Image (spheres, grey):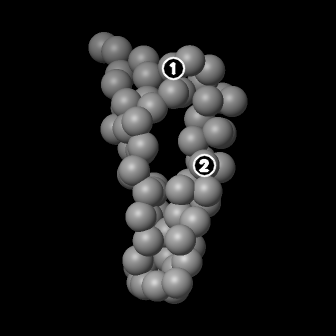
Amino acid sequence: MTRVVKMLGIVNCTPAFVDQPAVVNGASDLLVDVFGERGKHARSAFGTVSLPMNMCVELEMIVEVAP
């Protein structure tokens, strides 16, 4: 992996919950801890009232890889 470009975090929550970015911060922090500067990325976070198999969080990442 060359670097993490972007991560999207979807949080399973109630309509009243407004701290989705704080939940996704954990994943962002982990990527930076593991990969250093290469782990820094753009990020989006939002909430939904349902995820497949009642998951808590779904993450999608775009990463750049070298041949």
- The quadrant of the image that shows the N terminus is top left
Residue highlighted by disc 1: 38
Residue 30 shown left or right of residue 5 in the figure: right
Residue 55 seen in render = no
Residue 2 seen in render = yes
Front-most of residues 20 and 34:
20
Front-most of residues 9 and 20:
20
| Crowd class of label 1 (few under 14; some 14 to 19; many from 20; radius 10 Å) | some
Query: Which residue appears at 65% of the width and 39% of the height?
Result: 30
Q: Nearer the viewer, mark 1 or mark 2?
A: 2
Q: Amino acid at mark 1?
A: Arg
Q: Amino acid at mark 2?
A: Asn
Residue 31 shown left or right of residue 9 in the figure: right
Residue highlighted by disc 2: 25
Percent coordinates x, y for residue 59 in the rendering: 45, 55
Percent coordinates x, y for residue 22 in the rendering: 61, 56
Residue 6 shown left or right of residue 39 in the figure: left
